Amino acid sequence: MLEKIKLSPRIWFALGAAACFSMLGVGAYFQFVEYLEPCPLCISQRIMILFTGLVFLIAAIHNPPACWRKIYAITGTITALIGAGISIRHIWLQHLPPDEVPECGPGLSYIFENFPLTETLKLMLNGTGECADVLWTFLGLSIPGWTLVAFLLLAALSLLQFWNQAAEEGMNHE
């Protein structure tokens, strides 16, 4: 079955990059059209979507030979799995009982202006009370739930490059 969807690594990486940048576009739509203000964990997830998209974009532009393709595949998988971890933390906060939700922190602009970088990163990755709010759902999943699904699919797409390389090598030996 996988033989039917055989595409060049450049196309797979370009599709991954397009997916990432589309996700960033959806995030911008929610923020600027639907007025859903992103929490620290939402912003952290967007940063990891951007990093994953940049890995895929660079790989697509580079059109790497086999050894580099593995490096891009591993790097893309790692960035996607870090993003998945942030999504899992966000989902966990959304499912806490109300009395266990952390307190809301100061706004991100205040944090960036008044806290050192290490404290800012800690606050962004731990989440705050507003991260527990579920502002939108589709088919029973909140935004972090769908983002987790996307990160896992991006990691799988990245790992698919190992299969893609093995299939390509098999074709070259025939």
Image: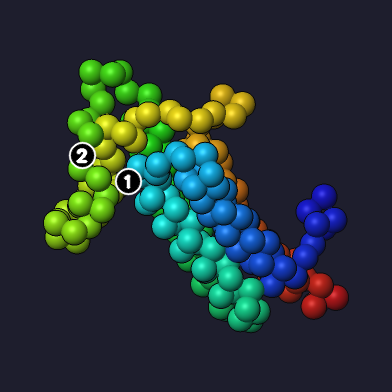
Q: Looking at the image, tell me whether mark 2 or mark 1 is earlier in sequence order.
A: 1
* Res. 88 image quadrant: top left
Residue 163 at what x, y percent from top left?
68, 61
Q: Position of residue 98 (x, y in %)?
A: 28, 18
What amino acid is labelled 2 in the image? Gly
Tag 1 residue: 40
Q: Identify the residue at horizontal 32%, vertical 23% (top origin).
A: 96
For label 2, the SS is loop
Mark linked to residue 5: none
- 18 lies left or right of 40: right
The vertical placement of 140 against 27, above or below, is: above
Measured along the vertical axis of the image, is residue 88 above or below residue 121? above
The amino acid sitting under disc 1 is Pro
Q: Do labels 2 and 1 touch, CB within 8 Å?
A: yes
Q: Nearer the viewer, residue 164 or 82?
A: 82
Indicate which disc residue 105 carries: 2
Name the residue at 22% across, 57% down.
112
Q: Position of residue 4 (x, y in %)?
A: 85, 56
Res. 95 in view: yes
Residue at screen point 35% across, 42% down? 39
| Element on which disc 1 rests | helix
Taking the image as shown, residue 93 lies to the left or right of residue 162, namely: left
Residue 151 visible? The answer is no
Instruction: Say few, some or many: other residues with alpha carbon within 10 Å of mark 1 (under 14 / 14 to 19 / 20 or more).
Output: many
Q: Nearer the viewer, residue 81 or 70?
A: 81
Circle 2 residues within 10 Å: few <14, some 14–19, many ≥20: some
Q: Quadrant of the C terminus?
A: bottom right
